[in-house]
Image (cartoon, rainbow, N blue to C red):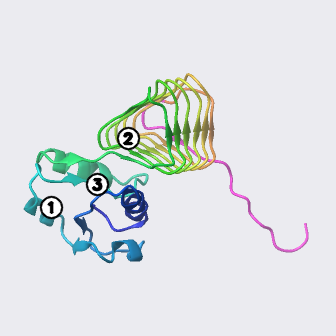
Amino acid sequence: MIGGGGHAATLLEILLLQGRDIIAVVAPEITAGQELFKDIKHFKNDHAILNFSPEEVELINGIGAMPYSGLRTKIHIEFKSKFYEFATVIASSANVSAYATIAQGAQVLSNATICIGSKIGFGTIVNTSASIDHDCEIDAFCHIAPGVIMSGQVYVKKSVHIGTGAKIINGIQIGKNTIIGVGANISKTLPDSAIVYGARPYIKLEGKL
């Protein structure tokens, strides 16, 4: 397991419940899920991974996917170039069609739904309770945040971040490197590197109006 934060802890819980063997965690420090990590060998430097043969282990990328941070993608590319494979993680509570395609290294978290004909790319996260309808295609290194609702036949290009609770209508395309904010409603195709701001937050006003 690479990473010791909240995303890593979430993945670790899924894997332990599925009876998977976790040999070690590599992270500067463990910042979440300390109870889960306490009996797992801890290395603080990524170079420790090289002590394990690519033929003997699979890696889990537990680095969270945040806008403007390329660390997660960098980890994937660096260790793939050294012939390591990344494990695919699918939570037992996820509802994934037998006719969907989940690429190696993708992660589908608790209560997510992926419908018939949809394709999830390498290293992409479909986070908690996200819903991907039929015949969508999501390229590599994307993050579909918790509670996203995506209608059918949406094409999401590489390295897109779709924020929590965003909604996307059917049949549109999201250009690569695009960032879609929390709660946004997407009803038209977006170009590469677009930034769509999310729904305005509720602000409590003090005093009388």
Q: Quadrant of the C terminus?
A: bottom right
The residue pinned by badge 3 equals 60
Tag 3 secondary structure: loop
- Residue lying farthest right? 208
From what the image shows, is residue 82 above or below residue 30? above
For the residue pair 156 and 176, the one nearer the viewer reads as: 156
* Residues shaded magenta: 191-209
Of tags 2 and 3, the one toward the viewer is: 3
From what the image shows, is residue 68 above or below residue 171? below
- The location of residue 173, given as percent across then percent down, is 49, 26
Tag 1 secondary structure: helix
Label 2 amino acid? Answer: Ser
Q: Of label 2 and label 3, which has the lower sequence position?
A: 3
Q: Is residue 157 visible?
A: no
**Label 3 neighbour load within 10 Å: few <14, some 14-19, many 20+:** many
| Rendered image: mark on residue 49 | 1
The residue under the point 52% across, 51% down is 128
| Rendered image: mark on residue 159 | 2
- Whole-angstrom CA distance, mark 1 to mark 3, is 11 Å
